[in-house]
Image: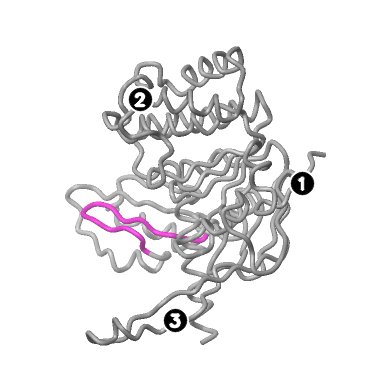
Amino acid sequence: MPNDIVDVRDVVKSFRTYENRKGFLGLLRRKSFMKKALKGVSLNVKESEIVALLGRNGSGKSTMIKLMSGILYPDRGSVEVIGMSPWKERTKLARNIGVIFGSTHPQLFWDLPPLDTFIYVRELYDISQRDYDSRLAYLKRILGIGNVYKRQTRQLSLGERMKCEFAASILHMPKIVFMDEPTVGVDLPSRMAISRAVLDLREKFGTTFVLTTHVVDDITIADRIILLDKGKKLFDGKQEELKKRFGKYAILELYFKPDAKVDYAKYGALGKVFSKKDGYIGLKVDPNITKSDAFASIFRDGSIEDYRLSEPGLSSILESTYRRIDSSKRSEE
């Protein structure tokens, strides 16, 4: 059994925030209050695991990443990464972790080529020339940056920059890498290159990855999903478990003949309509709908040309999960 490389127990973290009162004078008399970003969260990550930390904006994802990487410290609770306290042993821990905070917090020198950043990383981490050359050759190949890493960073596209950011964070071969929304706005080929690199690094070197993202394609490479909402942990398990718990419905798509006069309202009785346009309607329905009389009846008037019944995708399941959370909170109020 792999050992835990991250162990977070009952972590609470609050921030002081401010609220301006109405009117011009309100700028001078701000009201302050403490906002809890994390409310007693516990989680663990095993060696060589890829974990996706999910949640809406304000759920506490980035705060958790900053706690695990030693940028912040908790008000209460404990955090251990590779057996170290991140904020107490930050310098020692930094030699064993990699951190990528997306395009908003770049580490590449803007007016210099990524190559200069790579050389700086080599010196910073005392990487031997032999190891540096072999690692750079590997990253150039797996990320496809051989034609861009010698150009000025400012001349690169966002996708090219993020691939080079990833390379700079991996050059010292850390045991665990924290990635906070690394592919927001990044083109599909670059996203796929980063995903392939993550999987390859895990397979070849046993690297552990913890990532936050809103991009569903990024989530598919994760071994496990941890779902946060308003500072609390709601789910911790595999994608299949998430689907069983929150995806207890099917997607029914109906395609109508071009000349058909469609009464879309009657199809709403089959389930919840999520999409509707000329000649098409999409519904969330009971997975066993094909066994019902209601399903058989929709074909009697001959207006349907084709249909498709499928399992919901991960993005649809997450949307339904958030709706259920919001509905539950409203019923408690």
* CA distance separating discs 1 and 3: 37 Å
Image coordinates of residue 274 in percent, x first then y, are 36, 60
Residue ID for mark 3? 32
Q: Amino acid at mark 3?
A: Ser
- Mark 2 vs 1, N-terminal side: 1
Q: Secondary structure at mark 2?
A: loop
- Mark 3 vs 2, N-terminal side: 3
User: In the rendered structure, which segment of residues is drawn in magenta?
Assistant: 273-286
Q: Is residue 111 left or right of residue 56?
A: left
Residue ID for mark 2? 113
Q: Residues within 10 Å of mark 2 (few under 14, many from 20)?
A: many
For image coordinates 63% across by 30% down, the residue present is 202
Q: Is residue 94 magenta?
A: no
Q: Is residue 284 magenta?
A: yes
Which residue reaches farthest left?
A: 259
Q: Is residue 143 above or below residue 195?
A: above
Q: Residues within 10 Å of mark 3 (few under 14, many from 20)?
A: few
Q: Amino acid at mark 1?
A: Gly
Q: Is residue 159 left or right of residue 314?
A: left
Q: Is residue 39 left or right of residue 282?
A: right
Magenta segment, prevailing SS (helix, strand or loop): strand
Residue ID for mark 1? 83
For image coordinates 47% across by 65% down, the residue present is 58
Q: Tell which of 278 and 319 is nearer to you.
A: 319
Are the residues tagged 2 and 1 within 8 Å (C-beta)? Answer: no
Q: Secondary structure at mark 1?
A: loop
Q: Tell which of 42 and 329 is nearer to you.
A: 42
* CA distance separating discs 2 and 1: 36 Å
